[in-house]
């Protein structure tokens, strides 16, 4: 299948935001990846244009006012900014490679895609340890990097309500769900999970309700990366476009703990690399994103080095397509 419009250039979109993570430091992840590229003697960051989306990380100094959706006012600002930047990049037929801090801004990327291609059906391949489908009504932590997939699916999941967010929180949550156009940007049945292994009951409920396929690490290993990639793409065969979201915590915590919420039983660096390089070659893939590198939790910049290797290999695969 031909892509909607011929691809011109890759545009790196840097989003150094960390307000939606529960631990501090993810905003430094992009610079850590750049340092890794220097240590590995790569010219990667001279090869592509890049644009930075201005962040609002200073609000962290004020403390949070919304316990069930921490810094939601800032998250709202960031989602809108990411949505319009990704939209701008797509409008001139460029391919956005989004390098972000906390995973919440993936919602902005999805909104930017849908704002540009409103009548296209968008599928999502979510490579992550977490399901990131909470809402202010269900979140155990209040950290909004656990919520992007609910934002773009226009969901509250009140069937599993455990929190009572206040009126002002709810108003902003409603506004978040309207970014990039009214209503759901994606259907949860057009989401495929890979290596998701740490989720709470309200997320399990949604996964069952929407029949979301989750390819486990064990399955990736026993069937092989190529077979799983093919199955993931097959599940999204009725979608017009595909967005890939790669959270580095999909990789096993034994390779690096340089991420806010590390989890064991994840992918190896090689598996993650092979997976992303195969998937990005699919003609329907319209944007790719990498998130959650946190060098303050790491030693010797290991996670950023692993992440950079994957970024470079994935970009090269995209250029070959
Ligand atoms: N993008 C992430 N690292 N998300 C972690 C979410 C962890 C947990 N489910 C929570 O809501 O707090
Ligand atoms: Mn995530």
Image: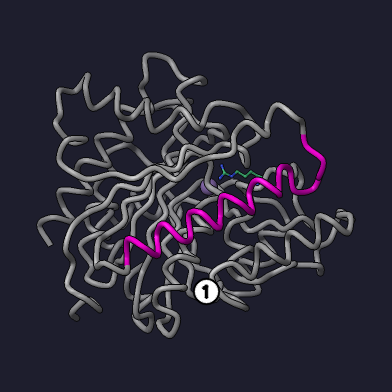
Q: Which residue is mark 1?
A: 186
Majority secondary structure of the magenta segment?
helix
For this rendering, which residue is in front, 140 or 26? 26
Q: Residue 307, position in %: x, y?
A: 33, 35
Q: Residue furthest left?
A: 320
Q: Quadrant of residue 157?
A: bottom right
Left or right: residue 242 versus residue 18 is left
Whether residue 215 is visible here, answered yes or no, is no
Query: Which residues lie in the magenta part?
Result: 64-90
- Magenta span has 222? no
Q: Say if 204 sits above or below 5 in the image.
A: above
Q: Quadrant of the C terminus?
A: bottom left
Whether residue 129 is visible here, answered yes or no, is yes
For this rendering, which residue is in front, 132 or 24? 24
Which residue shows up at 61% across the image and 51% down it? 77
Label 1 crowd bin: few (<14), some (14–19), many (20+), radius 10 Å? many
Q: Residue 205, position in %: x, y?
A: 70, 65
Q: Residue 37, position in %: x, y?
A: 23, 27
Which residue shows up at 52% across the image and 74% down it? 186
Q: Say if 171 sits above or below 46 in the image.
A: below
């Amino acid at each position: 299948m031909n892509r909607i419009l011929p691809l011109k250039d890759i545009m790196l979109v840097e989003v150094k935001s960390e307000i939606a993570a529960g631990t501090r430091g993810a905003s430094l992840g992009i610079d850590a990846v750049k340092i890794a590229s220097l240590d590995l003697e790569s010219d990667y960051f001279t090869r592509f244009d890049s644009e930075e989306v201005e962040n609002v990380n200073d609000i962290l100094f004020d403390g949070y006012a919304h316990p069930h959706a921490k810094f939601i006012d800032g998250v709202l600002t960031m989602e809108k900014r990411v949505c319009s930047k990704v939209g701008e990049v797509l409008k001139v037929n460029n391919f956005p490679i989004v390098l972000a801090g906390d995973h919440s801004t993936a919602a902005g990327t999805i909104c930017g895609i849908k704002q540009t291609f409103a009548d296209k059906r968008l599928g999502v391949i979510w490579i992550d340890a977490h399901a990131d489908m909470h809402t202010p009504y269900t979140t155990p932590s209040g950290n909004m990097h656990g919520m992007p997939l609910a934002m773009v699916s226009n969901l509250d999941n009140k069937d599993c309500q455990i929190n009572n967010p206040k009126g002002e929180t709810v108003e902003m949550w409603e506004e978040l769900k309207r970014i990039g156009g009214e209503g759901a940007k994606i259907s949860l049945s057009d989401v495929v999970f890979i290596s998701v292994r740490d989720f709470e009951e309200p997320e399990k409920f949604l996964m069952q309700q929407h029949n979301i396929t989750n390819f486990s690490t064990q399955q990736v290993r026993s069937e092989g990366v190529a077979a799983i990639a093919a199955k993931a793409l097959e599940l999204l065969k009725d979608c017009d476009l595909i967005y890939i979201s790669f959270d580095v915590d999909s990789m096993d915590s034994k390779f690096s703990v340089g991420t806010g919420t590390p989890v064991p039983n994840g992918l190896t660096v090689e598996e993650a690399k092979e997976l992303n390089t195969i998937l990005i070659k699919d003609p329907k893939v319209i944007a790719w994103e990498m998130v959650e590198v946190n060098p303050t939790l790491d030693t010797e910049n290991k996670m950023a080095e692993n992440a950079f290797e994957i970024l470079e290999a994935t970009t090269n695969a995209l250029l070959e397509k």
